[in-house]
Image: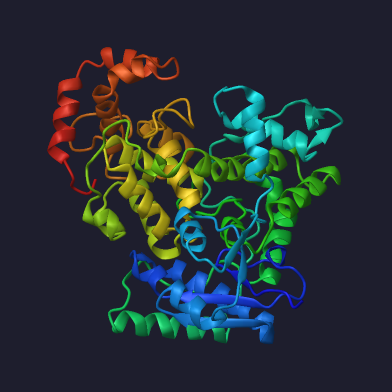
Amino acid sequence: MAPRPHWLFGDQLGPHFLDPGAPVVMIEARSAFARRRSHRAKAHLVLSAMRHRAAELGDRVRYVRAGTYREGLREAAGDARVTVCRPSSRAALRLVESLDRVEVMPDRGFLVSREEFAGWIEDRGGARLRLEDFYRWVRRSHDLLMDGGEPAGGRWNLDHDNREPPPRGRDDLGVPAPWRPQEDEIDDEVRRDLDRWEREGRVRFVGRDGPRLFPVTRREALSALRSFVAHRLPEFGRYEDAMLAGDPVMSHSLLSAPLNLGLLHPAECVERAERALRSGAAPLNSVEGFVRQIAGWREYVQQVYWHFGADYRHRNELRHHTRLPRWFLELDADAVRARCLSTVLAQVRDTGWTHHIPRLMVLGSHALQHGWDPEELTDWFHRCFVDGHDWVMAPNVVGMSQYADGGLMTTKPYTSAGAYIHRMSDLCDGCAYRPAERTGERACPYTTGYWSFVHRHRDLLAANHRTARAVRGLERLGNLPEVLALEEERGRRAP
């Protein structure tokens, strides 16, 4: 019997999502871009990746451009039964499960299956789902960075070795530049189509579509991985949490986009990094930090996305309901005087990417301090980042960044006064504000915002041993009324 056609979604583009010989269906649905106002660079990346994959598959693929996925599947497969690997989002899963002629197969894009995760939870007997416990389990079960039954180097987590501030007096980290692709005629076609769709009013975008910065083919993704491990991984660990205005990439891998498009499998990323450790090409703190990001955090958020249920993205335990301001929605970095926020917002506007610390401690922290609606913020991150997918952003924003789940994922809210940004970056240099000042025209918005947040949620924070110290600091603050008055006066204006 001839194999049934296999439907590939736009985040299932690597060879591990296909069996040999099976015919392929791919659907480019305009509705995916019409539903929400996405970053232009993200739309370009996804369409370029899909069209490149179709070109590679040649006559094996039936590639359909349609208004919706249902229309496209009807045109591509007619009444034939098709298979599909389990989609990564709830919306896509609901779609394929509603179609009688679609058989849903297990996912192939992660290290840990849902069944394995369920078994891990059962073995824990109801204990809380902490990342560190999950990470150690993944390390053991996949024999990652292990020396027999013990972690390589004798420690599971080298996070404390990976929190150095950037070298002072330097505009960049001084490591080789990241791998970058060369655009081709498919990119030209994508850009023309996006221009036409905008002119016709079919879609609306935010951000800029500059030269493509991320891989869209398997070959490009492997080149990016090899380049990172050879040239940037050795310096990755120590400056993992640091920020420089002139060097937004630092030593980060930039592999989240090809990983989330399915062009790379996480196993090959962590295994290549471990080989660099074993050969002496990269130090343990860098390799462990990279492995923790992929085999730890990435796997963890994918599992909790499904485990916590469909209502998780609607959680709002802090009762934050302020709508996102227009300057933020429009990525209007020029409207912002605070240099840290303006710099990071410009990075998002121009590239659709920043690394995890600007996301958490600049963008997310500002939103948390000002009580922005976490579900609306989740949607913003989803559509404004090239690596943004629902399974990625719902746990990262609702749980990690905004503490809207009340502590299901993390043990405390992640926010800080301006002193943290000053210590971990050069973003305060030349700013109109001063991180140590709480009142007056030069009072740092992150400092006033932090103390306002602590005041607003003092009962919750006082009951948490990890944040009780902040409440004690609030009680010693002699000018709290002035700080709160300034924060109220500034309101929703761009800081």
Q: Is residue 462 above or below residue 157?
A: above
Q: Is residue 148 above or below residue 41?
A: above
Does residue 476 show up? no
Does residue 173 show up? yes
Q: How is the image coloured?
A: rainbow
Residue 77 percent coordinates (x, y)? 56, 80
**Residue at 22% in and 56% down:** 326
Q: Quadrant of the C terminus?
A: top left
Residue 136 percent coordinates (x, y)? 69, 31
**Residue at 66% in and 32% down:** 120
Q: Is residue 42 above or below residue 434?
A: below
Q: How many marks?
A: 0
Q: Quadrant of the N terminus?
A: bottom right
Q: Quadrant of residue 230?
A: bottom right
Q: Nearer the viewer, residue 467 or 11?
A: 11
Q: Is residue 414 above or below residue 6?
A: above
**Residue at 65% in and 42% down:** 115
- Left or right position of 281 against 256: right
Q: Nearer the viewer, residue 63 or 378?
A: 63
Residue 350 percent coordinates (x, y)? 41, 64
Q: Nearer the viewer, residue 83 or 100?
A: 100
Residue 175 percent coordinates (x, y)? 64, 54
- Left or right position of 145 against 383: right
